[in-house]
Image (cartoon, rainbow, N blue to C red):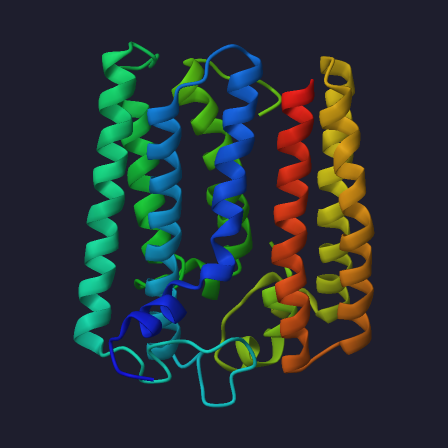
Amino acid sequence: MKTNSLKAWIVAIRPYSLGNAVILILVGSALAWTDGSFHTLPVVLCLAFALLMQCTANLVNDLWDFLKGADQPDRLGPDRAFAKGFITLRAMKAGIIGFTLASAAAGIGILAWALHHDMLAWGGWELVAVGAACVLFAYFYTAGPWPLAYHGLGDVAVILFFGLVPVSFTYYVLTGTWTWEVMMINNFRDREEDARCQKRTIVVALGARFGSWSYFLLGTAAVALCLTLLAGGRPWAALLPLIYLAGHVATWRKMVRIDHGDQLNVCLGETARNIMLFGALLTVGILLG
């Protein structure tokens, strides 16, 4: 592969991981739509911010996991661009800065729109704080003097910043209000090499059996939470995600059967597919009522 080529950058930003960001924004937007407050421009800006921040985090992770020794030649996961020499150090640093600035530009656009339409309860400082926290998470997930992923907090941070924050703040930007309605396979696969380089994920700390059952329970818990939407008068949103369980259980059983090695990358791809299916079903369900 040609160094610093477009193909190399596509490998670096990990397109297979971006679908989750899209789905989260769609779910928040669908909730706002059904509540009578949908606006195209801020949705596009929220989507751009989420995708650009995901790319930023992926690039930082690509660089710093190599520098910390986590990405060795015997790495089990998909190719990492910097570790493979596809992108030079100078270009990678420039790319991280560029994606960060682009994310900030999208965030400023969201803030400007929300202020212009008087959608914010605290004068915009809440969006500034969340935007800054997103940038800090993108860097300190694997970089910095105390990287979260190496101290057992990476999984918690991912749930927060690649789950709750995108959905709830998309809804908040569009409506100006809050509502009560508003990850594990990687760590299972990488548990041995993570332990070797002292990357203290939850799976490393508590074991493979815990990791496999956590994967199963996270998916089923997501569906169970959707069932609570029945109380809010959203039967389609509550019941459609049940379809996702078939794919989730099948992938979990395959993960347990394979147990370790690079064959788990198949489960990684299936998990990305399942997440998109879940998000699509939930989004359609919300729109149907």
Quadrant occupied by the C terminus: top right
Q: Is residue 172 above or below residue 108?
A: above
Tell me what residue is drawn at x 69 percent, y 27 percent. 285
**How many numbered discs, if any?**
0
- Which of 33/190 is in front? 33
Q: Is residue 136 above or below residue 46?
A: below
**Residue 261, position in %: x, y?**
66, 82
Query: Picture quarter containing residue 59?
Result: bottom left
Give x and y (percent) for residue 136.
31, 48
The quadrant holding residue 50 is top left
Q: Is residue 44 visible?
A: yes
Q: Where the N terminus falls, by quadrant?
A: bottom left
Residue at 22% across, 23% down: 112
Q: Which image quadrant for residue 230?
A: top right
Q: Which one is in front, 212 or 243? A: 243
Q: Is residue 154 left or right of residue 143?
A: right
Give the residue at x 82% y 51%: 246
- 265 vs 103: above or below: below
Answer with left or right where residue 223 lies relative to residue 176. Answer: right
Horizontal and vertical percent position of residue 103: 27, 44
Residue 205 visible (yes or no) = no
Q: Position of residue 195 (x, y in %)?
A: 56, 77
Identify which residue is drawn at 20% across, 48% down: 101
